[in-house]
Amino acid sequence: MGFIKADRSQLNLLGYSISDFASSDQKIRFIVDIVSRLDLSSLFARYSDQGGDSYAPDMMLTLWFYAYSQGESSSRKLEEFCVYDTRYIYLSCNLRPDHTTLSRFRKAHLDLISEYFVQIVLIAEQEGITDLTHIAIDGTKIKAASSPKQSYKEDALDRKINSIRREIAAYMQRCAFVEGGASDDLAIETLKEEKQHLESIEQNLVKRNNQLKERQKTVKTEYRKNHRINLVEPDARSMKQLDGPGYNAQLAVDSRSNIIVANEANDQPHDRYQFSNMHQKAEENLPSDSKRAYTADAGYHSLDQLEYIEDNKVDGLIADQKPHHRSTNTEATNIQTIQKEKRKVERKDFLYHEKEDYYQCPAGDKLYPKSRRKNYTTYRARACAECPISIYCLSKKSKRKLLYRDPREKLAEKMLNKLETDQAKQRMKMRATSVEPVFGNIKQNLGFRRFNLRDLNQVKGEFNLMCIAHNLNTMFKLIGNRRLAAFIYAFQSKINQHIAISKTKSAIYSIFWRQMINLLLRRKFAFV
């Protein structure tokens, strides 16, 4: 097997070449250049030397990269663009692959996209557009390709299985009647085929029902009854934010350049345990740097993740969902303050004495350990009956104040103290203006609100393509603007060397070149 020749510089019989379709400042030339810098040896190795010629894999990869960077993920649309859109004609070298070939290429090599994603990130770092020292982590939910109408709860799935079984029994009875000599509207062969088809449906439904029961064990008890499974795409989970099946998409973004440095798609409905996963992926993708810092919003806050940060010495910040639950004060809240404000007594109003292991309440009472479990210790007050603020502290059914403390609670208190510093506040502001706009660009500007491919492995590959699309657009803008600025500076410096010292000429040239520079900036030339 060879490859169909794809040469963009070859002259046509009429005297033009494919390269004439693309000016030097277009994004298509930039993406062709980026793909030429990738190590595609593993991709080429998948092609055999036997059989007919194939389309060059680097050309096909370039087509998909550009299509996703334009917000287009349909293979049929891409086939159409390769016929009449000069940009795609340039990228495909006027070879016009059909939608089946394009779709097969994407599915067959999705597992390699993560490798090319990392290579593109490293190219961005080599170009000097970012130093990769501050990484922001966040997540969003993206709809699955499957319809929510195919999602069933356990009771609905049981009814569907019973209904199919009744149909199977009816076909079995009809087959028995026909074999006994009775007449039927359908031939015996057709009846048996229909019965076999129903049996395969039943097997699939039973399999999905077993999967649903196993997955219910990982869900909180109060949510198990309403937990659903999608018959077509069981990997996708029903998520409240999507009103249907979807996936949790995670990003780690460089705050300086908005370049995505790591990504992940999973079926978890929340972000509570995702910080460690994203940190590990980012560190695998990037060159080692002891100064690298990470930030995440309150959705990632859990004692497990704080323990991970502490054990691995990560410079990480995770916002706290419940700062009022932390005992970070140096002294207990004054009792007069609570009486004056007439507010509920919160956990932060109690002062924890770590050395003596007790809590001190605003009224001065001490809460000592009542019992110790593996995951928490219970602290109980002694004199609540006569306390003047008991109406603000105790519930109607409680007679004594109880507090529960996890052995790792000090990690949350340490993180909250860190969050109160000016440097931490500045880092959290940077997080909000880096990773969240990236999701806005992917979902709003590029239009990726739904996956086209099914199953978790394919979804991960497609999400890598979405992230590559964002990175290519960002790199094109940043590298183009940087080269434009360097060009203007060098051009202006060279002209100034040849300008006469005369005040009149100097003033005229100054006005002229100032207008030229403004014109260039307005047109946003990118010299790539």
Image (cartoon, rainbow, N blue to C red):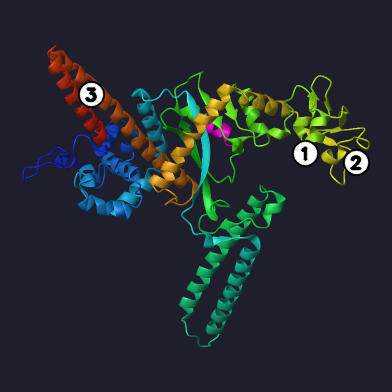
Q: Residue at x 29, y 44 (%)?
A: 63
Q: Say which mark, if any, is on residue 343.
A: 1
Camera-side mark, 3 or 1: 1
Q: Left or right: 339 with respect to 53?
A: right
Residue 155 magenta-highlighted: no
Check the image and name the residue furthest to the front: 504
Q: Around disc 2, counting alpha carbons within 10 Å, would you say few (fewer than 14), some (14 to 19), or many (20 or more)?
A: some
| Circle 3/circle 1 CB separation < 8 Å | no
Give the Cα distance between marks 2 and 1: 19 Å
Q: Residue at x 19, y 24 (%)?
A: 511
Q: Secondary structure at mark 1?
A: loop
Q: Relative to the observer, which residue lies in front, 206 or 69?
A: 69
| Identity, as a three-letter code, of the amino acid under mark 2 | Lys
The range drawn in magenta is: 274-279
Residue bearing mark 3: 488
Q: Around disc 3, counting alpha carbons within 10 Å, would you say few (fewer than 14), some (14 to 19), or many (20 or more)?
A: some
Q: Relative to the observer, which residue lies in front, 381 or 242?
A: 381
| Circle 3/circle 2 CB separation < 8 Å | no
Whole-percent x, y for residue 447 in the image: 40, 48
Residue bearing mark 2: 399
Q: Relative to the observer, which residue lies in front, 499 or 295?
A: 499
Sooner in the amino-acid sequence: mark 3 or mark 2: 2
